Image: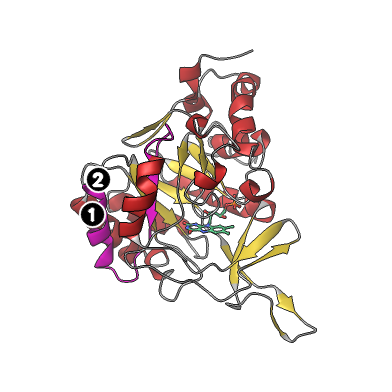
């Protein structure tokens, strides 16, 4: 049974998306690479690769390595800087016909509002995603490991850019992700993006050294799905009313439905784009039937459908 197209729409605070399937930062370039491979206008949104205020060369190679059921990366935020993004990538991204969410990271707290303010002055962005959690850059992880720092960073961006919705992207490498999510909400985030990669290591024992040039890296892909899903579940149950974007190991429609019923209002697909770039479109096409199977007519009705569950006894 197919549903009317509007039934796929979903809301993240002030951000309304045509459907809940987005592509994750760092796994989709600046989208040009994928033009011609898929119809970009059908996506719920594109989150381009993280940009920083100044250009960065990133980490020494190798920067990625395959693992069983996932991959480890330590790119180190290689990018040409915010001005270059606004001048060279945004004009193209504006034309693709789906929401564009600027993802940025700051190396010091004061940079967050500066970047948000710059972004507030340009046309063509639907929202900001604050990368508070890049695991492979010195200092980069600190903003989302301490609730106070997270709240301050979000609030400063919210003040500097009051008109754009803000998503706070968090690291799973904390004892209590609920506390950090609550801090993001207190700072004024419209939603939290859960989660970035999990810290990991691939070692080359014969060469007596880590495989990646950076040593440690971030794990992504199918291996992390149950871990990321738990973060979504815990935050959804503890923070009703705080919209969540679920991220981690999503490759097929069942993965998407798992995240929706666990409390995510939208999802981002990451590592799958490297080995199956059409996966996001396939999932969008499969969504109406999956909603019907669940017995609901809209994405909104699926969100958190399992969250009322309680253990027996
Ligand atoms: C090669 C690679 C590069 C990434 N770069 C970024 C980045 O620049 N900014 C960011 O917020 N997340 C980045 N991520 C994390 C993803 O956006 C996503 O949070 C993570 O990979 C989990 O989703 P997945 O299991 O579907 O890949 C990167 C992930 C990979 C695999």
Q: In this figure, which colouring scheme has been used for the structure?
A: secondary structure
- 190 up-or-down from 20: above or below: below
**Magenta-drawn segment:** 94-122
- 135 up-or-down from 160: above or below: below
**Whereabouts is ligand 1, in terms of quadrant?**
bottom right
Q: Which residue is mark 1?
A: 118
Residue 122 numbered mark, or none? 2
Q: Cβ–Cβ below 8 Å for labels 2 and 1?
A: yes
Q: Quadrant of residue 73?
A: bottom right
Which quadrant does the C terminus fall into? top right
Q: Quadrant of residue 114?
A: bottom left
Q: CA distance from mark 2 to mark 1?
A: 7 Å
For image coordinates 47% across by 27% down, the residue present is 300
Q: Position of residue 53 (x, y in %)?
A: 31, 64
Residue 193 numbered mark, or none? none
Whether residue 264 is visible to the viewer of this picture, yes or no, is no
- 49 up-or-down from 135: above or below: above
As for residue 62 lying within the magenta part, the answer is no
């Amino acid at each position: 049974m197919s549903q009317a197209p509007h039934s796929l729409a979903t809301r993240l605070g002030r951000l309304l998306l045509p459907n809940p399937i987005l592509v994750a930062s760092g796994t989709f370039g600046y989208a040009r690479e994928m033009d011609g491979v898929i119809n970009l206008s059908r996506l719920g949104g594109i989150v381009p690769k993280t940009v920083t205020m100044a250009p960065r060369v990133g980490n020494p190679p190798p920067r990625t390595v395959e693992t069983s059921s996932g991959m480890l990366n330590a790119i180190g935020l290689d990018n040409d800087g915010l001005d270059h993004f606004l001048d060279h990538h945004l004009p193209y991204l504006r034309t693709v016909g789906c929401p564009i969410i600027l993802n940025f990271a700051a190396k010091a707290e004061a940079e967050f509002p500066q970047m948000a303010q710059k972004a507030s002055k340009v046309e063509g962005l639907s929202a900001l995603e604050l990368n508070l959690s890049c695991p492979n850059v010195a200092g980069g992880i600190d903003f989302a490991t301490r609730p106070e720092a997270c709240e301050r960073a979000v609030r400063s961006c919210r003040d500097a850019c009051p008109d754009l919705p803000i998503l706070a992207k968090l690291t799973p490498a904390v004892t209590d992700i609920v506390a950090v999510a609550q801090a993001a909400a207190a700072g004024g985030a419209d939603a939290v993006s859960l989660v970035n990669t999990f810290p990991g290591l691939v070692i080359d024992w014969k060469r007596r050294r880590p495989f990646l040039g950076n040593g440690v890296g971030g794990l992504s892909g199918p291996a992390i799905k149950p871990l990321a899903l738990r973060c979504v579940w815990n935050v959804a149950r503890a923070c009703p009313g705080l919209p969540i974007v679920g991220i981690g190991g999503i490759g097929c429609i069942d993965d998407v439905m798992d995240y929706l019923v666990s409390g995510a209002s939208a999802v981002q697909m990451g590592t799958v784009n490297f080995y199956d770039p059409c996966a996001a479109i396939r999932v969008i096409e499969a969504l109406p039937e999956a909603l019907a199977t669940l017995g609901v007519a809209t994405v909104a009705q699926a969100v958190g459908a399992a969250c009322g569950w309680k253990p027996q006894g």
